[in-house]
Image (cartoon, rainbow, N blue to C red):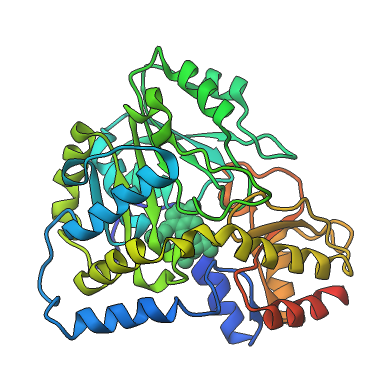
């Protein structure tokens, strides 16, 4: 057979793969795809080595190793005063991506509508399409990239099955706060829809602001699945371990799908994370300061350039307006920046159904100071 009718005909290669490949080809400093250029804590790596060497190499339980689920439950209690049953309400997955995918497959039926906020992380829509649903795009409101509640209200209807939230928000660095969650809960009250809350950057929130998790909102929590990623928290994006927290009934449906997607998640790393999470709470508690220092350093360096920024409130990403530098559309600007000036970034129009005329690119500042300084030297010349 020469060709296959695609189930994802609108999807090309992800922008993260495209830009990282272009960066490698042109030996550019890669501030595009989001990943740290430093290692996980040494003590955590030692725990992985320990468990690899002591017989944790066969299938773990489908929902995750009990010690890790206990440690996650303890963290949710300590941090957010959220009480969940690790046995029936936490499922460990192979990265947040798998959790998001399983959640969408578990809930979305043919003809259902799913609301996402643009710019939207790129894995949401393909998951909805494969489930036979239709994605309804509601743009966030510039310049703060806050939820446009009027547009949301106008988009909700009886076909709405799911609303996908993301806070701290990739790619804008915006946050949803507790008042937003109250308003959302009131707006969703007449509808029977669910919420899928992508909170993978929960620990990377700046300037003393708290992370507002849907799990701590009693009304929303009843209809929500929340998704997290150890990749972000432990500087280990390549390990691909995350988890989904949801009430028992929703977790049951989630697990029904998950058992046939990957069944279970890499065992020795789960054991190592269980040890480290309970033994080293100072790691995640220190992340706001750790990443705020990087953000502030990068912003001071960008002061010497013609990029214009509003400081990110969370995540390890910074949007920058390049309109003083170029009139090119962001995809072309990002390519040229990579190929001709040696700094790779992510254009954000690709995360929109219909992109606005703004000129923004996204920098990842999860990098060593020297990497950011070298990149800034190149950016200052533009
Ligand atoms: N959601 C968002 C908003 C992300 O930025 C990422 C990280 N790439 C993911 C989900 C996926 O996380 P993971 O690498 O754990 O699959
Ligand atoms: N989440 C990462 C980012 O936003 C990339 C993940 C991926 O490459 N799929 O850059």
**How many numbered marks are there?**
0
What residue lies at 45% left-to-right and 76% top-to-bottom?
A: 40
Residue 5 at x, y = what percent? 30, 55
Q: Is residue 372 left or right of residue 261?
A: right
Relative to 12, does residue 249 appear above or below in the rendering? above
Q: Quadrant of residue 294?
A: bottom right
Q: Please, which residue is most extreme toward the top here? A: 190
Q: Between 41 and 349, which is closer to the camera in this rendering?
A: 41
What residue lies at 40% left-to-right and 46% top-to-bottom?
A: 78
Q: Is residue 297 visible?
A: yes
Q: Quadrant of residue 193?
A: top left
Q: Between 168 and 152, which is closer to the camera in this rendering?
A: 168
**Quarter of the N terminus within the rendering:** bottom left
Residue 107 at x, y = what percent? 26, 35
Q: Quadrant of residue 346?
A: bottom right
Relative to 366, does residue 321 appear above or below in the rendering? above
Relative to 51, does residue 130 appear above or below in the rendering? above
Relative to 20, does residue 173 appear above or below in the rendering? above
Q: Is residue 122 visible?
A: no
Residue 116 at x, y = what percent? 49, 37
What residue lies at 60% left-to-right and 31% top-to-bottom?
A: 147
Q: Is residue 59 left or right of residue 11?
A: left
Q: Between 259 and 290, which is closer to the camera in this rendering?
A: 290
Q: Is residue 331 left or right of residue 18?
A: right
Q: Between 32 and 228, which is closer to the camera in this rendering?
A: 228
**Quarter of the C terminus within the rendering:** bottom right
Residue 317 at x, y = what percent? 63, 59
What residue lies at 31% left-to-right and 49% top-to-bottom?
A: 74
């Amino acid at each position: 057979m020469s060709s296959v009718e695609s189930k994802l005909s609108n999807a090309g290669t992800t922008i993260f793969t495209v830009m990282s490949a272009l960066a490698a080809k042109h030996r550019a400093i890669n501030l595009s795809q989001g990943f740290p250029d430093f290692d996980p804590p040494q003590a955590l790596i030692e725990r992985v080595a320990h468990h690899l060497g002591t017989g944790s190499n066969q299938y773990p339980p489908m929902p995750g190793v009990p010690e890790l689920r206990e440690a996650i439950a303890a963290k949710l209690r300590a941090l957010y005063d959220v009480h969940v049953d690790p046995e029936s309400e936490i499922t460990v997955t192979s990265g947040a991506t798998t959790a998001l995918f399983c959640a969408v497959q578990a809930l979305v039926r043919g003809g259902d509508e799913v609301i996402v906020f643009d710019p939207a992380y790129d894995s949401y829509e393909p998951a909805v399409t494969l489930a036979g649903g239709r994605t309804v795009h509601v743009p966030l409101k510039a310049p703060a990239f806050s939820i446009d509640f009027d547009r949301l209200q106008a988009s909700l209807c009886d076909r709405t099955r799911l609303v996908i939230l993301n806070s701290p928000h990739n790619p804008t660095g915006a946050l949803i706060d507790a008042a937003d969650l109250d308003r959302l809960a009131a707006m969703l009250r007449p509808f029977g829809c669910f919420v899928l809350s992508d909170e993978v950057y929960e620990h990377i929130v700046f300037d003393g602001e708290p992370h507002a998790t849907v799990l701590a909102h009693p009304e929303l929590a009843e209809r929500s699945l929340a998704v997290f990623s150890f990749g972000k928290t432990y500087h280990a994006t390549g390990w691909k371990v995350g988890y989904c927290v949801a009430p028992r009934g929703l977790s049951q449906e989630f697990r029904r799908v998950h058992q046939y997607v990957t069944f279970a998640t890499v065992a020795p790393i789960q054991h190592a994370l269980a040890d480290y999470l309970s033994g080293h709470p100072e790691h995640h508690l220190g992340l706001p300061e750790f990443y705020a220092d990087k953000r502030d350093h990068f912003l001071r360096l960008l002061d010497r350039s013609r990029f214009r920024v509003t400081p990110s409130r969370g995540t390890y990403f910074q949007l920058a307006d390049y309109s003083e530098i170029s009139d090119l559309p962001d995809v072309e600007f990002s390519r040229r920046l990579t190929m001709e000036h040696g700094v790779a970034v992510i254009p954000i129009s690709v995360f929109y159904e219909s992109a606005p005329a703004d000129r923004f690119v996204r920098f990842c500042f999860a990098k060593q100071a020297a990497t950011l300084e070298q990149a800034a030297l190149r950016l200052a010349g533009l």
